[in-house]
Amino acid sequence: MMKLGWYHDLDDTERRTYWACFAGFGLDAMDTTIYALVIPALIATLGLTQAEAGYLATASLAGAAVGGWAAGILADRIGRVRILQLTILMVAGFTCLAAFMSDFWSLAAVRFLQGVGYGGEAAVGGVLISEVIRPGLRGRVAASVQSSYAVGYAISVSLLPVIAALFSEEMGWRVFFALGIVPAGLVFFIRRLVPESGIYMQAKAAQSDGAVSPPVWTIFTGRHLRRTFAAAVMSTGIFGGAYVMITWLPTYLRTALGLSIKSSTGYLAMNILGSLVGPLLYGWLSDRIGRRPAFMTFLVLQSGNVAILLLAPIGLGTTIVLSFFLGAFQGALAAGMLPTFAELFPTSIRASGQGFCLGGGRGFGSVVPATVGILAASLPLGTAMGACALCAYGVAFCATLLLPETAGADLHGDPGARDPRPVAPGRADGHAVPPHLARTDA
């Protein structure tokens, strides 16, 4: 059996950083998934169309594109931990502010700014945990942070029937958004207990001795260009397909399949359970066979699962079973990008590189859920969702073929300067990971 023995191998700094990133991403995920759950209420009470609901999802993703790169640039200059705190505050504040909006345009503006914070937090948190965790454990530990998305989603789904029972539909979605202020409290924990990345501090010390910070466009030059392009296209496909399901699945269950809020909550519970397990599976697999083969495996599995779930004539029981795997494969793919993208770039541009690739994927992929809303005007919602998601995953698979294998890269050096040929998982030089860094039972 697979055991999470890696947690016991972490030192105190690694554990504090892990829980800060886990909690930050999980609470921000709670805020982000609230929107998907209240789409039916927004359509009913504010008179939004399905296309406008899709545009609101796109506004958040476009904000994430801007926020991911901007936060990454700032994190390369003033520190990972400072920017992590700032982005968590942005998500919490603008989610709460959405409770006071009453029209499409004001909601779009607030959703965009919330997305700026969410995209920044995901990018900077991914860099911080990847730099703090030692190479032999990085794939499992960094990927497992994505499991907190399932925790955040579970919180928001659990709150939905409670709020629906206590408040009218008109007031319920406003109360739901107002609860988004809760993650702001995490900042006090981070300020007191989480130190700055040692790798980042060493790089800044070298700069103070005369080195010059590279310009922001360095990720588009020389040997970095191919990596940036491949990673951004891959994340576009992964996020595009994922956000089709995240944005439209609750609406599909209630409007297309006719499930009640109670039944939909049970269905989503299986999806959330899968989202908890998937990142752990990816981390375990990628530390053994490599990052790229793991991505390819889960992209094929997710494409087949989505095709059956949305396009095949299946019963409710099969639908519930497939919802578990939908969450697992989706969570695995999202989790894999955190350690992989950090391993692509040197320290001086690592956060901006990861921020652009993650944020750019969210931004470019944001057209996919909007496209579903447009197609749903003339096609069944399930058909529109399936077609868009499968196209997105196909794009991601092609981009994966262009990525080098980076498992076990030494982030103190410059991963971009290494030979891009595949290496043995565990260390950048192709040798086995020392026993105290990579347990066989983890």
Image: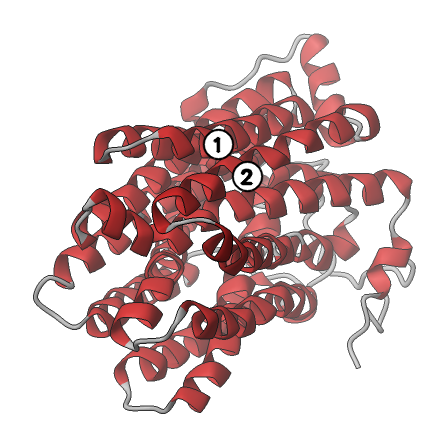
Distance of mark 1 from mark 2, alpha carbons? Answer: 6 Å
Q: Could you tell me which quadrant the N terminus lies in?
A: bottom right
Badge 2 is on which residue? 179
Q: Who comes first in sequence, dot 1 or dot 2?
A: 1
Residue at point 48%, 65% (across, down): 330
Total marks drawn? 2
**Which of these two is toward me, 274 or 260?**
260
Q: Where is residue 377, by image quadrant?
A: bottom left
Look at the numbered disc 2 and give the secondary structure of its residue.
helix
Q: Could you tell me which quadrant the C terminus lies in?
A: bottom right
**Which of these two is toward me, 177 or 68?**
177
Q: Where is residue 103, by image quadrant?
A: top left
- Residue 273, numbered label: none
Badge 1 is on which residue? 96
Q: Determine contact: label 1, label 2, CB under 8 Å.
A: yes
Residue at point 46%, 34% (across, down): 95
Q: Is residue 367 visible?
A: no
Around disc 1, counting alpha carbons within 10 Å, would you say few (fewer than 14), some (14 to 19), or many (20 or more)? many
- Is 55 on the left or on the right of 145, as rendered? left
Give how far across and how far down residue 257 sits, in percent: 30, 77
- Is 250 on the left or on the right of 287, as rendered? left
